[in-house]
Amino acid sequence: MNKSNKIAAKNITAAAICLALCMVLPIFTGQIPQIGMALAPMHIPVLLCGFITGPAYAMIIGLIAPLLRMMIFGMPMPFMAITMCFELAAYGLFAGLLYKAFSKKIIFIYISLILSMLLGRIVWGLVTLQLIKAAIFPALPMGWEQFGWDEFFAAAFVTAIPGIILHIVLIPILVLALRKARVV
């Protein structure tokens, strides 16, 4: 097997593991939806996938994971699953692109991660706004009919603070451990 086939096999395997983690991790927080929404466990494997496999695989995993999880487990609800598809795809895409673009110093893992999280949340807000304006969904999540800047900021940043902290602490540690193990 030549080097490019080995890299492709490694990336496909890592992406599949990240997709499996997207299915399993929310089970640990699923009993209390507010904790699941605050910790955002599906975001972790997608962001990791960006660092491990690069932008293309991670974007695909981010795009399909919420819909696949909705079809298998019934959660997230359809409106949230669709908005999460775009958000997680952006996370994976930007994490992979920024990690490749920056130096491999530890500080740039944090910069790549934080920028990816910011850009993903902006994408989520724009998609959410467009879906609400398009009135495609007859039943929006409670209180989302008047989605605006205040609701965006509250949902994307204020209620997500525990998850943001978890991601900023956990993901760089995992990336460094995977780098040391020569997976990344």
Image: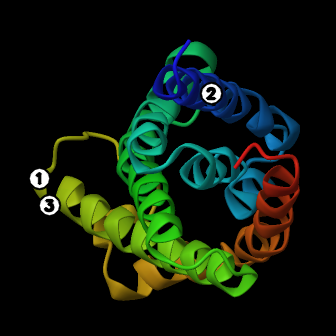
The quadrant of the picture occupied by the N terminus is top right
Using a 10 Å C-alpha cutoff, classify the residue at mark 2 as few (fewer than 14 neighbours), some (14 to 19) or many (20 or more).
Answer: some
Earlier sequence position, callout 2 versus callout 3: 2
> Do labels 3 and 1 touch, CB within 8 Å?
yes
Position of residue 74 relative to residue 81, above or below, is above
SS at mark 2 in the image? helix
Q: Amino acid at mark 3?
A: Lys
Q: Which residue is mark 2?
A: 10
> Do labels 2 and 3 touch, CB within 8 Å?
no
Q: Which residue is mark 3?
A: 133
Q: Report the residue at 40% width, 74% height from top.
A: 119
The circle on residue 134 is 1
173 or 45, which lies in front?
173
27 or 115, which lies in front?
115
Q: Tell me where residue 78 appears, x and y as whole percent.
A: 41, 34
Q: Report the residue at 76% width, 60% height from top.
A: 39
Q: Tell me where residue 138 appears, x and y as whole percent.
A: 25, 39
Using a 10 Å C-alpha cutoff, classify the residue at mark 3 as few (fewer than 14 neighbours), some (14 to 19) or many (20 or more).
Answer: few
